[in-house]
Image (cartoon, rainbow, N blue to C red):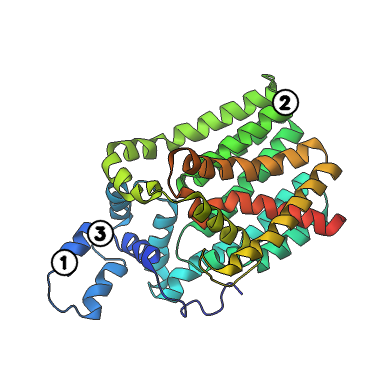
Amino acid sequence: MRFTNLDQKPYWHDEIYTSLRASGYTAEEAIQALYHGQMIDVETLLTYQRPAPERTAIDTLTGLATEEPHHPPLYYVMARFWAEWFGSSITAMRSLPALISLLALPAMYWLCWELFASPMVGKMAMALLAISPIYIRYAQEARQYSLWVVLILVSSAVLVRAVRQKIAVNWGVYAIAMIPALYCHLLSVLVVLGHGVYVLAIERFRLSRTVLGYLLASLIGMVWFLPWVGIAWINQTALVETTAWMKQPLPLPTLIRFWGVQLSRLFVAWHFRSDSQLVYLAIPILVLAMVALNFLCRHTPRSVWLFILTLIGVTALGLVLPDLLWAGKRSTNIRYFFPSYLGLTIAIAYFMTHA
């Protein structure tokens, strides 16, 4: 399913920017060359959608740093090399995330095994991940989100193992797993924070060896991420400008309808607006999610259900609360909720195999 009709969907705004970054040109250079009031032929336009021989991955990094510092560079550098090797057609650019998304299947199984030691739950979670519209959609989009899903699952599996086994080397592996996650998406900070809440709660807020292991691993990961934090700070004007849309206020009823659309995407492939009556399809899915979470909390150890709740809750609250307290529409962006989607997927998989 992930490789079906890769070139049939319109190559939209964000994907065009992926190709622009892979080309090594900046948006400013493209605008200066293309916006001159005259007719532009296709080949000239595609110059800024293909890797330029005179540009390198360093130019990709420079373009991101100066124009889009809210996007860490890992995926875009990968896309640069991918386009050099396999071409920059729509099919080629979308094949990279589609291939990466396949890694999410064993990663999901691994996380479920660490949580439940049950192949049945892992297989069901893999099946849901394989057919869920939200995961398929972003597996076919030339952006970093399929890579982010894989890294969330891997870092989470390593964390659960580290908490259970209490072996120091596992915390080193967790620090290593955290670094690419941070360099893939800034919201990985919320995932790491959720992991921290989980570890503290499991240890009942005592400064145990497990908590110290998490703190040291997190510190190492964050230190490795500091160079990009510094770049974002230096280019904070661009950071503010490119994320200004998040602060546009929306009425609470509109936000709630957006949340309904987002929740429905876990199982419903139809594309509909937030003002459509189809938004009420979210109600049975919400009921299923609540029933599954309640069942999970009643039938699994505290170390299991608490991990799922923190994986879902910390990211969701980190996006929803700012919109409620200070206005904005951060929480209307469906792809920011992948940690929460993954937690819900696991909870529903457990419910479906044990109810």
Instruction: Give the residue number, with chain letter if any, for mark 1.
Output: 33
Whichever of labels 1 and 2 marks the residue nearer the N terminus, that label is 1
State the SS at label 1: helix
State the SS at label 3: helix
Tags 1 and 3 touching, CB below 8 Å: no
For image coordinates 15% across by 79% down, the residue present is: 39
Seen in the picture, residue 319 relative to 150 is either above or below; the reply is above
Residues 329 and 292: in front is 329
Q: CA distance from mark 1 to mark 3?
A: 10 Å
> Residue 59, position in %: x, y?
28, 54
Q: CA distance from mark 2 to mark 3?
A: 48 Å
Instruction: Give the residue number, with chain letter if any, for mark 2.
Output: 203
Instruction: Give the residue number, with chain letter if any, for mark 3.
Output: 27
For image coordinates 69% across by 26% down, the residue present is: 210
Q: Amino acid at mark 3?
A: Ala
Left or right side of 290 for 270: left
Left or right side of 67 for 346: right
Q: Amino acid at mark 1?
A: Ala
Left or right side of 49 for 205: right
